[in-house]
Amino acid sequence: MRWMSFERQGTVSFGIVSEDAVIDVGAHYSQYKSLKALLASGELDSLGAEAATRASDYALSEITYLPVILHPDKILCAGLNYKAHMEETGNEDTSAPTLFTRFASSQVGHEQAMIKPRESDNLDFEGEIALIIGKAGRRISPDAALSHVAGYSCYNDGSVRDFQRHTSQFTPGKNFVRTGGFGPWMMTPDEIGDLDNMEITTRLNGEVMQNSRAAYLIFSFAELISYSSTFTELVPGDVIVTGTPAGVGAARNPPVFMLPGDQVDIEVSPIGTLSNTIIEG
């Protein structure tokens, strides 16, 4: 099942994607104010099965995509989590994940413009798989970790490289407003099947820049969840962005950064494709 957040005629809602249309679950079940609230209720599966029997309400062309989860409590991002990417950036292996945080205001939805900030010409692409927490937990064991996942999505961890490298802390370069893409929807694990077979492909103006599979993660989805839950309680709607493969623009010779007018597509098979254009801001 594919779940999304969207806006139509000024009203924010969420629903189930059915072919090229959406069932407006937020309108039909108004006790749930958002997809995040539905996750917190623990009724995603049961309500989804009931709601999926309804007729679609709108064509996808009639709605505006929003980030899959609006206002998540936490967005945790893993850096240097593919060996080839670690090597291309000149970093060494670590015994624990490299984590940093994003703010909700740094995200945009599918088909929305990402903003290259006026302060920099170094906006880089990072195609990634995001996982969305569906069940709260603290000190979660790796064996139990995947049972806390509601679904997976595509993510572009857009990075303003010069600001990222001002110090050893990544936060400034990862949190310019509207520099990260999140969408187009969340796919539930039962439809994905073998998680290791998920394939990430990043295209810039149609040219393939990155390609890899989840099997090549250094720290697996389960390990990232377990480690993160050691220092914070994970709650429904939290997002963990799991790392980018080799091929980022900053590591190329010459470097390749995103410019106004560019289009960047992050495809995660079998989930779908997140597409964003770049504008100056």
Image (tube, rainbow, N blue to C red):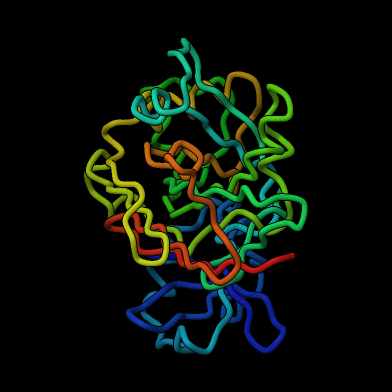
The answer to whether one can see residue 206 in this image is yes
Q: Position of residue 76 (x, y in %)?
A: 60, 36
Name the one closer to the observer, 145 or 268: 268
Q: Position of residue 55 (x, y in %)?
A: 40, 88
Q: Residue at x 29, y 31 (%)?
A: 216
Q: Residue at x 29, y 52 (%)?
A: 190
In the image as oriented, which residue stretches furthest toward the front? Answer: 254
Name the one closer to the observer, 182 or 82: 82
In the image as oriented, which residue stretches furthest toward the right? Answer: 119
Q: Is residue 267 above or below residue 195?
A: below
Q: Residue at x 35, y 24 (%)?
A: 83
In what quadrant of the picture does the N terminus appear? bottom left
In what quadrant of the picture does the C terminus appear? bottom right
The answer to whether one can see residue 47 in this image is no
Q: Residue at x 50, y 56 (%)?
A: 43
Q: Position of residue 218 (x, y in %)?
A: 36, 24
Please give left or right for residue 238 compared with residue 202 in the image. Answer: right
Please give left or right for residue 189 compared with residue 37 in the image. Answer: left
Please give left or right for residue 262 compared with residue 87 in the image. Answer: right
Q: Quadrant of residue 100?
A: top right
Name the one closer to the observer, 23 or 113: 113
Q: Position of residue 73 (x, y in %)?
A: 69, 44
In the image as oriented, which residue stretches furthest toward the top? Answer: 95
